[in-house]
Amino acid sequence: MAGRSDQVVVRGDGSGAGGVDPQQLWQSPQQPRKGRKPAFSREAITAAAVALADAEGIDAVTMRRVASEVGAGVMSLYSYAPDKETLLQLMVDHVSGELSPPDPLTGDWRADLKAIAHAQRALMLRHPWLPTALFNRRWSLGPNTLAFVEHALAALRPAALDGGAKLEVFSLITGFAARLVGDEIAQAALSASPDRAAAEARYLAAVAADGHHPELAEALSAPTRPLTPDATFARLLDRMVDGLDAGS
């Protein structure tokens, strides 16, 4: 999956994140180029990195720590992933495999696009490091990610969009899901600290009452909508997807 429209292509020099040629990364044999046959695989290394990120967060993923998890010397890992950015690419594609096989398409592209967004949200909630990993990086597309992109483009076939617009819509949906899940995770952390949450509420109430922010005061006084994460995500997703112009 990719977070921005410029992330669905690789740089013109043929390199992806970490300077690795995407053909070398995704299509070459998954084994080191030299040395004796190891007792582990790229799949095992990637799975260990994902498990570490799931348990402790993305900052815990270092080449040394992952090497320790698989019982390898850190230098041997560089034959599989020359740097952390490349390892993150492998991790993103690894978890993207959980999106397959996607639900059958209905032919209603808006409904199918919403189903895709909900699948992405569920994936990101299972792997809370994923929204952070998707932002501020340039991605080449691994096989699992490509399969999901293909599904999304097929979902958009009934819409009157050209290929570039379809890629933009897919990236828009992915970025939307990543941003909302990131906010959801942050809010969950905030709610775990009642004092902090109460302080935030007091601050907003004071700002709304100071007379300098009448629009905000009016907005905050409006009837509240369901604020559960599920309801908020569905409501905002409906608003965005239903507003897309298929002729653009």
Image: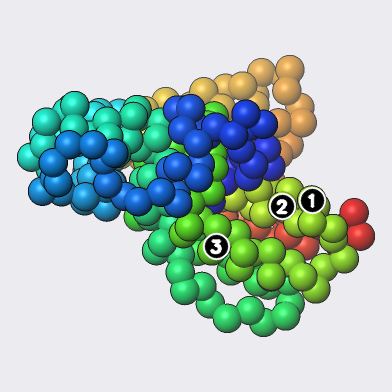
Distance between mark 2 and mark 3 Cα atoms: 12 Å
User: In terms of depth relative to the viewer, which is nearer, 180 or 246?
Assistant: 246
> In what quadrant of the picture does the C terminus appear?
bottom right
The numbered disc on residue 201 is: none
Which element type, helix, strand or loop, lies under badge 1?
Answer: helix
Residue drawn 45% across the image and 28% down it: 18
Is any atom of residue 204 visible in this view?
yes
Compared to residue 154, the image places residue 104 above or below, namely below
Residue for badge 1? 164
Distance between mark 3 and mark 1 Cα atoms: 17 Å
Residue drawn 17% across the image and 36% down it: 35
Kindly indicate whether the residue at mark 2 contacts the one at mark 1 (C-beta within 8 angstroms): yes
Residue for badge 2? 167
Residue drawn 61% across the image and 38% down it: 10
User: In terms of depth relative to the viewer, which is nearer, 214 or 192?
Assistant: 192
In the image, what residue type sits under mark 3?
Phe
Residue for badge 3? 148
Is any atom of residue 230 visible in this view?
no
Q: Residue furthest right?
A: 247
Label 3: few (<14), some (14–19) or many (≥20) C-alpha neighbours in 10 Å: many
Rendering quarter of residue 80 = top left
